[in-house]
Image (cartoon, helix red, strand yellow):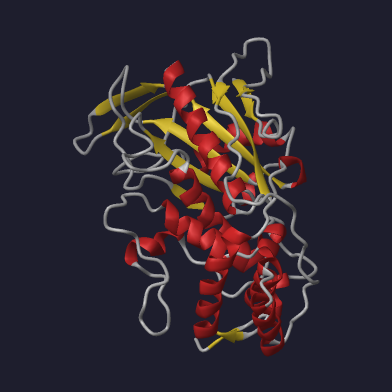
Amino acid sequence: MKSFRIAALAVVFGVGLQALPASGNSEKVPIPPHKVPTVAPAGDWKAAEPAAALEFNEVAKRAREAEEAGDAAAALTAWERVLDRTSCTEEARSAVRARIKELRPKVQINRDPAKARKWSVLALIYGEVDFEKKDANGNTRRYRQVFSDRDVKQVGRMLAGFRDLVFEWSSGIVLLEIDAVLVKEPLRHLSGRNGYYADIRDAAPEVRKAQEKKHYDTVISYVKYHGGPGASIPRPPFAGATYGRVGQFKGAGYIMIPWTPSYPFKGEFWGEVELHEWLHQIDDVLSVNLGYPRGTFRSPDDGRGEGDNRPNGETEYRKPRNVRTWVYFYRHLMQEHMTRQMWNEVTIKGNLPQKPGSVIRILGK
């Protein structure tokens, strides 16, 4: 296999990023440069108080006083403490998210990747898939697809977009370190019946080899489905799918992307499908590993059902009619449901000695 790394530490100097060869038969793959978030002004933020429950009325009073004094940074921090350190009704939390939405663009964020928390991602690009399956009539059919150099560069651009969205919308707190591996040995098996995909057992050999050298928090597999040179592979009924935690992958989340040259779909952002799937893993991390009550975060699928509703029936986020992408719903989740402290806590490690989310309870459910 040949490998390359999508780095992101050149942002301060404004230089372009390229693949780093891992072996003598590797080839460089150009990766778009890291985008500097446009939210101003630049700066750092102070971490939250320790994981101890706070009193809702006291913290809310602190937030209102800071807003009256024109201190947006202090007000935002206090409103965030309501979400991640106090018990209150869902109606109150919805009102707090509205205040956070207004304040966050006014407050400093981290622009220095060196100060961000690192989240390791392994992206497996299966350069060739060549396998046989029997159809309903018992006839054997061969399927074969190959990633071209252009395809690989396109995946690299998707991964770069994914990296940039996470860094910006986590307020510069989480930086994806992506190792993208182009697997040269043909993949001889895909799982599924009415559509085929690289399930856990299919990806396990390459994942195990990679994890012998490094720990990964997320694994992504890319399998090409049409575009040549052989027979197109029947697609599974999803544009992407995610396992929140995989024991065989040392607890890492696993994202399967049945890739075609049409990704990203028309109107979508580069990296949008990866971000959507990764947020499923973050939802799992928050509730299981960190102990936050279900509903503190929301599934990225909820936007399509206008599921992020206030108790009075209004909708916190509604996609404009002329916008095709759902990426702004994901930003809503990452910046209004997630606090900066929660981004500072995310980890795939289970059985933490202290679950920070266990100090709050959402009332009124």
Q: Position of 135 compared to 64: left or right?
A: left
Quadrant position of the N terminus in the picture: top right
Give the image location of residue 283, x and y in percent. Answer: 55, 62
Which residue ends up furthest to the front in the rendered image?
A: 69
Query: In the image shown, does 267 or 193 lie closer to the viewer?
Result: 267
Query: What residue is drawn where x is 59% and y is 75%?
Result: 293
User: Where 168 falls versus 295 (above or below)?
Assistant: above
Can see residue 20?
Answer: yes
User: Where 59 falls versus 207 (above or below)?
Assistant: below
Query: In the image shown, does 49 or 138 lie closer to the viewer?
Result: 49
Which residue ends up furthest to the left in the rendered image?
A: 137
Residue 263, by quadrant, is: top left
Query: What residue is drawn where x is 32% and y is 17%?
Result: 229
Query: In the image shown, does 5 or 352 lie closer to the viewer?
Result: 5
User: Where 274 falls versus 28 (above or below)?
Assistant: below
User: Where 236 falls versus 186 (above or below)?
Assistant: below
